[in-house]
Amino acid sequence: MKRALSLTLFALASCCFVSFINPTPDTVAPGKPAVRTLIIDPGHGGDFAGAQGLFSNEKQVSLEVALKLGKAFQKEFPEIKVVYTRTSDANAGNKKTLNEDLRYRADLANSSGGDLFISIHCNAAGKRPGGWYEKVVVGKTAKTRMVGKGKKRKKQTYYEYQYQNVWRENTAKGTETYVWAVNKNDAKINSVAKNNEYYGEMDSVSGLKLPDPSDPAEMARMLVYAQNYFKKSLTLAGFVEKEFAASGRTSRGVRQRNDTGIWVLQATGMPSILVEIGFISNKEEEEYLNSEKGQDEIVRNIINAFKSYKEKLEAKGPKKAF
């Protein structure tokens, strides 16, 4: 039985691998809408506040932007059904733990038949929002002292250091859009920027066990994902960052997390992206994220990116994603 199952999984993985090498066009059938059901996921909520700013927090900002985004979609694309993972300051699905909360988000997206998943988050970096004081050396004075005993006694030079508390402004800023790391060794995603310098705060990173790429069943599933969803996710993510950059924002690019993964991207069976709309730990960017102007611009950026994504997928004839 086990041998038969292994052979079946191997055959599936092999078929998927062949398809992956020769992927189908990144389009949909003529006349078929690219997206019929959109899942919008405001990060954090309830007991899980997320990143902290000087006067606001991530769960609040992500909800405000996500709700505005949903309304904009419903106005411009009334044919698209919008499903939110949460619409108030509560744990998603009123779950008690973070793991249950995250599982609910992915399960809701899958059970709703979502064609696209967009998660909204705020980023954070540094020691404290706004900035912090740090003790630094500003000078030193050379002095001498006698050390040793008897004939070995001699002068020794040492230094007394002068310290000062210096203000370090939290300057990290900009947008990032994450896609699922299909396979850590996949050459197709080598061009995607790696996030090694900042650590973010995404609630999608948790103690939930992520797929094991060495397992045949998970390998097959990842290859199916690569065939059906990865290129579309990467295409949309690229459009989002392009729109942010065009509006004057600092775009830190399309990224992936190879080290810990992102649960809501790993567990949703559809093209999916996680948008870090800015650093709430940066004073100026926090003000922007909380302003009507800033939130409206972010929504418009994502809407414009979606329009480009939709047009690309619904274009007649096969076209490459890149």
Image: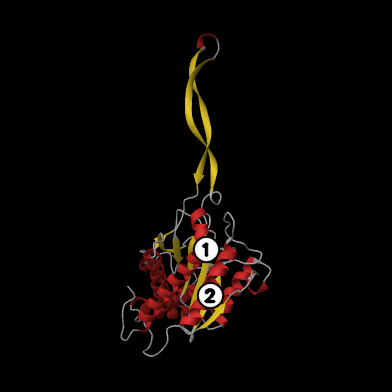
Q: Please, what secondary structure does the residue beneath circle 2 have?
A: strand
Percent of width and height locating residue 147: 53, 15
Percent of width and height locating residue 263: 54, 68
Farthest residue to the bottom: give it: 31
Three-letter amino acid code of the residue under disc 1:
Ser
**In the figure, residue 49 lies in which quadrant?**
bottom right
Decide which of 158, 261 is in the foreground and name it.
158
Select label 1 or label 2 by which is in front: 1
Farthest residue to the right: give it: 96
User: In this image, 239 relative to 287: left or right?
Assistant: left
Task: Classify mark 1: residues with Cα within 10 Å, few (<14), some (14-19) or many (20+).
Answer: few
> Which residue was labeled with disc 1?
291
Task: Classify mark 2: residues with Cα within 10 Å, few (<14), some (14-19) or many (20+).
Answer: many
Farthest residue to the top: give it: 151
**In the figure, residue 92 lies in which quadrant?**
bottom right
Q: In which quarter of the image is the C terminus?
A: bottom left
Percent of width and height locating residue 20: 37, 76
Residue 85 seen in the current view: yes
> Which residue was labeled with disc 2?
40
For the rendered model, the colour scheme is secondary structure
| Residues marked 1 and 2 touching at CB (< 8 Å) | no
What's the mark number on residue 24?
A: none
Q: Which of marks 1 and 2 is nearer the N terminus?
A: 2
**In the figure, residue 102 lies in which quadrant?**
bottom right
Percent of width and height locating residue 98: 63, 66
Decide which of 273, 246 is in the foreground and name it.
246
Q: In which quarter of the image is the N terminus?
A: bottom right
User: In this image, 221 relative to 50: left or right?
Assistant: left
Three-letter amino acid code of the residue under disc 2:
Ile
| Residue ID at (41%, 74%) | 304
| Residue ID at (67%, 71%) | 95
Q: Please, what secondary structure does the residue beneath circle 1 have?
A: loop
